Image (tube, rainbow, N blue to C red):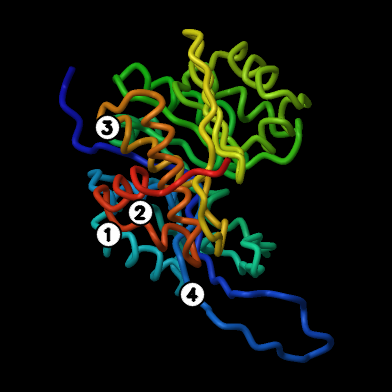
Amino acid sequence: MTAKSFDYASMGFITFDCLGWPFTAVPPGGGCYMIDEITMAVSGAAGVAAIAAAKMGLRTRAIGGVGPDLMGDWVMQRLHDFKVDTAMMQRKPGWKTSSSIVTTRADGSRPALHMKGATGTFTVAREDFAKATDATVFHLGGVGLMDAMDGEANARLMRHAKESGCITTVDIFAGSADDLPDVDAVLPYTDYFMPSIEEARALSGLEDLEDCTKFFHDRGVACCVFTLGGDGAYYSHTDGTRFRIPAFDIQVKCTCGCGDAFDAGYAVALCKGFDPETSVRFAQATSALNATGLGSQASVESFEHTLNFMKTTPTRR
C-alpha cells in the first residue's frame, strides 16, 4: 500500500463561531446584559476535528468550503495557525462562510443561531477523490448539512476512500429519520460511525443502546462509537466487542464541539495503534478537555497533554 501524505483528512462541516459566556436570557427590547467572556472558534464536525487533531500532532488536511468574507478569512488563518493543510478548502464569489452565534449557559449547554453557508454548497469532484483521500484516516463530518455532497456524491467518495485503503470515520448532523437516506448512503463504507446517542435515536427511532447499534450494523457499519454526553461513550463492533466508558469528572464550561473533538481524539488513537478501550478513553479525554474551555478545542493542547489528562483525571461514578 502506497504511503499516505496525511495522517488525517477531515471533510465537511467547517464553521465560524462567535461564543459568549455565561448566557442567561435575551434582553428585552433593545436592552443589553453583561457577560464575562466572548471568543471565536473554528467549529463544526470537520473543523473542530481538523484543528484538534493537528494540535495533537497529526498531519491534517481540511476539506470544505468558506466564503470570501471576514469569517472565511479568519477560519483560513486559524487553520494555517495550526498547520492544517488547506489545499482543498474552497472559496467562491457569492458564498458565505457557515457561521454561528453561540450563547453558552453556565451549565455548558449552548443554544445557537446558525447560518449553513458554504457547507451546503462545496463539492469534491471525482478527479479530486485521490487527493481528498490521501490520508490514513478519512473523516466525513457533518453528513446531513452538506447539501451538494450528501447522498450519492458522498457515497462515491467514501467508496473511493475505502478502496484506497483509508480508515473511514463518519459523524453526522441529524435531527430525525428524515436525515436517514443521506446517512444510509455512506454507512456501507464506514469503519467507525460516531454520532451522539441523541442523533442515533433520532435516526433509528429506537431507544436502547444495543438496539441502536444493531440498526446501524445492519446497514453496513463495522463499528459504532456513540457519545453519551455526561454518561461517557459506548462501543459496539461487529466482531462482538462491546463496552461502555464513563465520562471524566470535570467542571464543564461549554459543550460546543465536544463530539467533534471526540472524533479527533479517536483519529489520533487509530493512528497511534491504540486498542479499542484505550482509543475510546483517549477520545473521551479529548472531548472532556474541549468541555473545560469556551469554544471548540480551546483546551486541547497536545497529544502529551491529552494523554496525561486521560491517565490522571478521575471518571464519574
* Separation of residues labelled 4 and 1 (CA atoms): 17 Å
Q: Is residue 205 above or below residue 104?
A: above
- Say what amino acid the circle numbered 2 marks: Ile
As rendered, which of 71 and 229 lies closer to the eye? 229
Badge 3 element? helix
* Separation of residues labelled 2 and 3 (CA atoms): 16 Å
- Say what amino acid the circle numbered 4 marks: Thr
* Separation of residues labelled 2 and 1 (CA atoms): 7 Å
- The residue drawn where x is 63% and y is 68% is 104
Are the residues at dot 3 and dot 1 in contact (C-beta closer than 8 Å)?
no
- The residue drawn where x is 36% and y is 30% is 278
- The residue drawn where x is 59% and y is 74% is 21
Q: Earlier in the sequence, mark 2 or mark 1?
A: 2
Q: Which residue is label 1 attached to? A: 82
Q: Which residue is label 4 attached to? A: 39
Q: Earlier in the sequence, mark 3 or mark 4?
A: 4
Are the residues at dot 2 and dot 3 in contact (C-beta closer than 8 Å)?
no
Are the residues at dot 2 and dot 1 in contact (C-beta closer than 8 Å)?
yes
As rendered, which of 162 and 216 lies closer to the eye? 216
* Separation of residues labelled 3 and 4 (CA atoms): 31 Å
Q: Earlier in the sequence, mark 2 or mark 3?
A: 2
Q: Earlier in the sequence, mark 4 or mark 1?
A: 4
Badge 1 element? loop
Dot 4 alpha-carbon crowd within 10 angstroms: few under 14, some 14 to 19, many 20 or more: few
Whether residue 297 sits left or right of residue 268 in the image: it is right
